[in-house]
Amino acid sequence: QAIAVNDGVVGLVPKHLLAHRRVLMEAARRDWRILRSVPAAMYTPDLRGRWRYSDDTGSDEGGEFLLEVMGADGGAPSLQAKFLYNGQETAAEGVMSISGRRVVLEERDAGIANKYEGEVSADCLCIEGTLICAEGGSGNTFAPGQTGRFAMRRVGAAPLAPAL
């Protein structure tokens, strides 16, 4: 069931059909302007893949931090994440919750609890926001109560500028 889209027809598309990804993708393929009528809360970007991480806390120890986001459905409201330091997987586990362009990543390990809250860029190549350390055990690069700014950029995208 395809939707032929033009400026006059966009407003006639029933809102319940916009929630169906296939219908929306077919309509967007025919004319991208249909995306203007989709409420931001209904759009969940596919964030699966590897992300290069940086922050302004000065606790990077000179190494490279990566986040790998996984899940069967990239548009799901919750995805699993694992953390890598210099190419090696750490013991920390993460859950990424997504609502529209808002992302909350919770990192947990023995004695470690960090929370990252951010926004996905319009091109879905960058996530920027704030971080807070709730619990800082052995191996955590943050101290309890420490806050800062972070940025993550998709691996393969242009280099990441330092977090503000």
Image (spheres, rainbow, N blue to C red):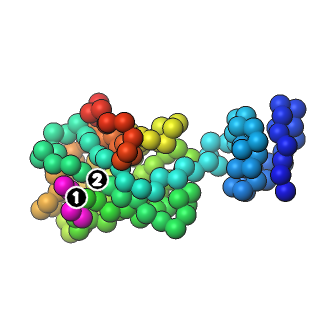
Q: Secondary structure at mark 1?
A: loop
In magenta stretch: residue 87: yes
Is 16 placed left or right of 110 in the picture?
A: right
Residue 101 placed where, x, y %? 52, 44
As shown in the figure, which amino acid type bears the numbered disc 1?
Gly
- Of 21 and 145, nearer the camera is 21
Q: Is any atom of residue 83 visible in this view?
A: yes
**Magenta-highlighted stretch: main secondary structure?**
strand
Mark 2 is surrounded, within 10 Å at the Cα level, by few (under 14), some (14 to 19) or many (20 or more) other residues, namely many
Query: Magenta segment: does it hold 110?
Result: no
Q: State the image quarter where residue 119 is shown.
A: top left
In the image, residue 109 above or below residue 57? below
Q: How many marks?
A: 2
Spatial CA span between label 2 and label 1:
8 Å
Q: Tell whether label 1 touches label 2 (CB within 8 Å).
A: yes
Which amino acid type is shown beneath numbered disc 2? Leu
Whether residue 91 is situated above or below residue 146 in the rendered picture:
below
Indicate which label's residue lies in the foreground, 2 or 1: 1
- x, y (%) of residue 24? 73, 49
Q: Which residue is mark 2?
A: 66
Question: Residue 127 vs residue 54: left or right?
Answer: right
- Residue 87: assigned label: 1
Residue at the image point whose x is 42% and y is 56% from the top: 49
Where residue 82 appears, as percent x and y from the top left, is: 32, 63
Q: In the rendered image, which quarter contains the C terminus?
A: top left
Q: Residue at x 52, y 53 (%)?
A: 46
Can residue 95 be seen here? The reply is no
The segment highlighted magenta reads: 85-89
Marked residue nearer the N-terminal end (2 or 1): 2
- Dot 1 surroundings within 10 Å: few (below 14), some, or many (20 or more)? few
Residue at 46% x, 57% y is: 48
Residue 64 numbered mark, or none: none
